[in-house]
Amino acid sequence: MRPPAVGFAGLTHLGLVSAAAAASTGAPVVGWDPDAGRVDAIAGGRLPVAEPGLEALLDAHGARLAWSRDAAALARCDIIYIAADVPTDGTGASDLREIAGLIAAVIAAAPAVRALVVLSQVPPGFTRAVPFASDRLFCQVETLVFGRAVERATRPERFIVGMAEPRSALPEPYALFLREFGCPIVQVRYESAELAKIAINCYLAASVTVTNMLAELSERIGADWQEIVPALRLDRRIGPDAYVVPGLGLSGGNIERDLATVLGLAGAAGAEAAPIRAMLRSSERRSDWALRMLHAGVLAARPDAVIGILGLAYKQNTRSTKNSPALALLRHLTPWRVRVYDPVVPAAEVEHPRAVAAPSALAAAAGADAVAIMTPWPEFRDLSAPALAAVMAGRTVLDPYGVLDPGAAAAAGLEYSTLGAPPAPAAERRP
Amino acid sequence: MLEHLRTPVSPERVVVVGAGGFVGGSIMRRLAADGVPSLAVTRRELDLLDAGAGRSLAALLRPSDSVVLVSAVAPARTAAHVTQNLRMAEAWADAFAAAPVAHVVYISSDAVYADGDGLVSETSCAQPSSLHGVMHLAREVMLSAALKAPLAVLRPSLLYGPGDPHNSYGPNRFRRLAAGGEPIVLFGEGEEQRDHVWIEDVGSIVGLTLAHRSRGVLNVATGSSVSFRRAAELVARLASRPAVIRGTPRQSPIVHRHFDVTACVKAFPAFHYVPLEEGLRRTVRAETADGAPAR
C-alpha cells in the first residue's frame, strides 16, 4: 500500500517541524504557506526557526518534501493538517483569523481530502464550527516544546484525536499515517481534544508555579532547591520528567495562551478559575527575579553601573523571544548601560537606548559591574568562572538557571545568585 | 501599577492640599528642593469640612496645576471620622468639576489591602478590614469617578520620621518611650513584620509621580519588612539613654505584611528607599539638630 500523502498548511514552527516528522515516516509531504517569502526561504534552506535536529531531519527526508506557494498543491494529499502557530497578544489571547483563513483556502483547494486535521492551538468549540464534512474533520493535539520539537514530533507519547464520532474508525489514510509513529491513539470528541491540550498546559503551569514558589522560599530560608529536586523526581506521583527545575515564570506564550483561554471559558461558564489567576501572578513575580536582584545587589548603590546580559532567547535552543525574561529585564534597565550577547538572537531585537552588542559571552561581561545569564544556552556552561571574574569590573553574577558551578564562582571571588538557593558570597575578594 | 511619561517634566505648579501635616510637610520639602513652584493649602487657608469648601478650593486652582491630596482625619477610627473624610473628598470632587486640573495625586494607605493575604502588590485585593482602609478606598473610587485628569494613587505603608504627630505602635512610639526613659512595650514579642517607610521617601515618590505625570496605583513601601522587635532594637541602639524592650502576653494571632515592590522598581528605576536603620539614624539627627526632643 502506498503511504498516504500528507499536506501541511502554515509553515511556522509547528507546521515546519510536523512536516519534517511526517516525511520521516516515509510519507510524501506537501508544505504550503500563503507567505511566499517564507516558502521560498524554507525551500532555499533558510529556516525561520532554530530547532535542534530540524535541519538534519529536513536534509535526510528532503526528497519527500515539496514546498509550495500555491494551495492547489495540497489537492493531491490524503490528509491535510492546518498547522500554523496561533499568534497571541500580550494577555495570551489568541488571534484565530489566520487559521480561519488557512482553513477556507484549504477547503477550497482540496474539498475531497480524506482527513482535514486542525493541529493548530485552537480553543474548545473551534473545530466543530469548521464548515466541513464532520466525518472527515478532525483536530489533533500538538504538544510541541520549543527546543525539543523534533524529538516530540518524531517520537510522540500518544496522539489525541478529536472527532465528531469518537467511536467510529478514522479514515484509513489518517489511521495508517498515525500508526507509523507506533504510539497509542486516543479518540475523543472535538471539545475534549481541544481541552486536553489546554489541560496538559495547565498541569505543567501548576508544576512550574509550585516549583517557583518553593524555590523562592528556599532562597529565603537557607534551603537549596537543587538538593530537593532528585527526591521529587524519585516520587512516582511527581515523576522523573516533572517540571521541578525553577525558572523565571511562564514564557514562550503557549502555556500563557491556554491559561488565558481557561480564564475566558471559566468566566463565561461561571466556573472557578482562581488557581489559574494565582499561576499568572506567580509567574509575573518570578519573571522579575533578576531585576529585583540587580537592584538589591548593584543598582541601588551604582547609578553608573554596567550590566552584562548573556542570552536573549526565552530559552535555550530556540530563536523565540516571546515573553523572554531577558528582554523583559532589559526594558527596565534603561537608565544603565548594558552589553548583550546571544548565540542566535540578534541584539537588534533589544529595545534599549544604551545597549551594546557584544560578539561573545565574555565580551558581554567585559567591564560589567554585574552579569545576568538569562538563557541557559549550552555554550554558557563552558564559561570559566575565573575568566568571567577576570574581565568583569564588579563581582555580581546572576545565574538563574545554574549554568555555572556555584562553588567555582564563589572561589573566583564572584557573588553568585541562582534560583532556589540563598545568594552565595564570594569566597575571596579582589583587592 | 503606574503608567507615565518616560521623560520627567517639572510641573508648572503643584497645589498640596493638606500641606501642614506630617506627609504634606515632606512633599513641600521635596518640591522646594526640586525648585517646583507650589501652593500650600492647610486647614488655616481652607477647612474642607466647611460648606462651600469645593468652591473655595476651585478658586485656587489653575488648569495647568498638579494637585496632591493629603488631607485626612487620620487614622479614621469611627464612622464619624469616615464621614468627615468622605465630605473632604466630596469637596475635592466638587472643586475638580468646577476647575479641572492637569494631574492629581492622592495619598491613600496600604490599609486598603486585605490583612494576611500574602505578599502585597498593587494588584492585591483591596478589601479593607478597618474603617481607615474603607475610608481611603472609598476616596480613591470617588476621585477616580470624578476626575477627567490622570489620577495617581499612592498607598504608603507605615511611616516614620521626625515630626510625626501620631503615636501609633511602631518606631515613632518606640522612640518617644525610649527618650522618656520608659520601656518599649511590644505586643507579644513583637514578631509581626512590617514595612517602615522614611517620611522623606514619601516626598521623593510624590515628586517623581508628579514629574512623570503618572497615573495608576503605586504602593509606597521599601520591600523590606522587619519585626517590631527588630525595629525596637534599632531604636534602642540609637537612643540617648539605655532602653528596655519588654514583651507582653500575645492577645492576637501574628499577621505579617510584606510588599512586592517590583512596580516601583519599574516605575522609578533610579529611586531607592532609605533602609530603616539609616532612616532612624536620620530621624535622631534631625531632631537633635532641631533641638526638638522626641515626643
Image: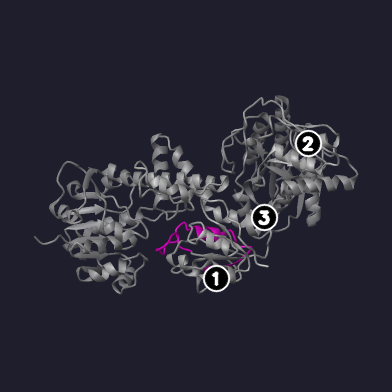
User: Can I make out residue A90 in this image?
Assistant: yes
Foreground residue, A81 or A21?
A21
Dot 3 falls on a residue whose secondary structure is loop
Which quarter of the image is occupied by the C terminus of chain A? Answer: bottom right
Q: Which residue is labeled 1 in the image?
A: A387
Which disc number belongs to residue B134?
none
Q: What residue type is labelled 3?
A: His
Q: Mostly what secondary structure, the magenta segment?
A: loop
Q: What residue type is labelled 1?
A: Ala
Q: Which residue is labeled 2 in the image?
A: B174
* Residue drawn at the location 32% of the way across and 47% of the way down: A197
Cα–Cα span, label 3 and label 1: 42 Å
> Which residue is farthest left?
A1
Q: Residues within 10 Å of mark 3 (few under 14, many from 20)?
A: many
* Residue drawn at the location 20% of the way across and 42% of the way down: A166
Dot 2 falls on a residue whose secondary structure is helix
- Range of the magenta residues? A312-340
Mark 3, chain letter?
B
Residue B256 rendering spot, x and y as whole percentages: 62, 36
Residue B289 shown in magenta: no
Q: Which residue is labeled 3 in the image?
A: B212
Dot 1 falls on a residue whose secondary structure is helix
Q: Closer to us: mark 3 or mark 1?
A: 1
Cα–Cα span, label 2 and label 3: 36 Å
- Name which of mark 2 and mark 3 comes first in the sequence: 2
